[in-house]
Image (cartoon, rainbow, N blue to C red):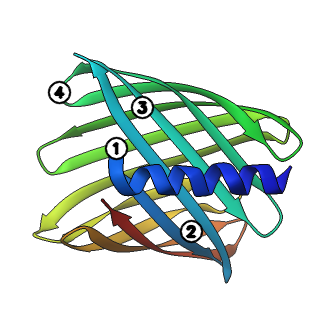
Amino acid sequence: MNKLLLAVAMSVLAVSATAGDSAEIQIVNGQPTLDLYISGKVSGRLGWSAFGLVNEGWGQAYAGPTFAPTSWSEVGFSVGVESGGKRFAESLWLGKGRVSVLAIHEHGYTGSWHKVTADVAMAKGLSVGYHDQAFLGRGPRVQLTRGKVSVWSALLLKDGHTNTVVALLVKS
């Protein structure tokens, strides 16, 4: 199953190089994860998105429709697979001016997961905010961007333990 998910993730990477959005390598407490996200427009406010993730022992891939009721909001619903079974996801993005919020909820074979990020652009190339992620905790995040490349980090507190996330994000 992991080979299938890796193949899907690599396909998503190949498509993202020509069609869209981002590839991200995250290091969570020293363990690497590769995330790939692409999206596109179908017509008017209707679009699509696809996401894939692989790490040493697990993987997932899902895709589905998105709808943008306003210029500053978008909702998405996705269906896919994960190591061992089916996976579903819902997302909400809000962004206006210097502020943006992204909330993702996933559920499926291995259970429920969520991530919420809220960022404020403080200056050109610098944003700060809040990060809440299942199993890792919540805390501050900072992101530095130059052109299509961003580096971000979050220090998350969960049950008295600090978890560190460092990521390199490349947009096409």
Q: Distance between the residues labelled 1 and 3?
A: 8 Å
Q: How crowded is mark 3: few (under 14 residues within 10 Å), some or many (20 or more)?
A: some
- The numbered mark, 2 or 4, whose residue comes first in the sequence reads 4
Q: Position of residue 49 (x, y in %)?
A: 45, 34
Badge 1 is on which residue? 101
Give the residue at mark 2.
156
**What element does badge 4 sit on?**
loop
Q: Indicate the amino acid at tag 1.
A: Val
Residue farthest along the right direction in this orientation: 84
Q: Please give the name of the residue rendered at 40% of the width and 68% of the height, measured from the top-left corner.
A: 169
Task: Compare marks 1 and 3 and give the one earlier in the sequence.
Answer: 3
Image location of residue 63, percent across then percent down: 56, 32
Vertical side of 12 occupied by 49: above or below: above
Q: Which residue in the structure is indicated by mark 3? A: 92
The tag earlier along the polypeptide, 4 or 1, is: 4
> For the point 18% across and 71% down, which residue is it?
147
Q: Give the residue at x 59% y 65%.
A: 34
In the rendered view, does 111 fall on the left or right side of 134?
Answer: right
Res 38 quadrant in image = top left
CA gap between label 2 and label 4 equals: 31 Å
Mark number for residue 71?
4
Note whether residue 23 is visible.
yes
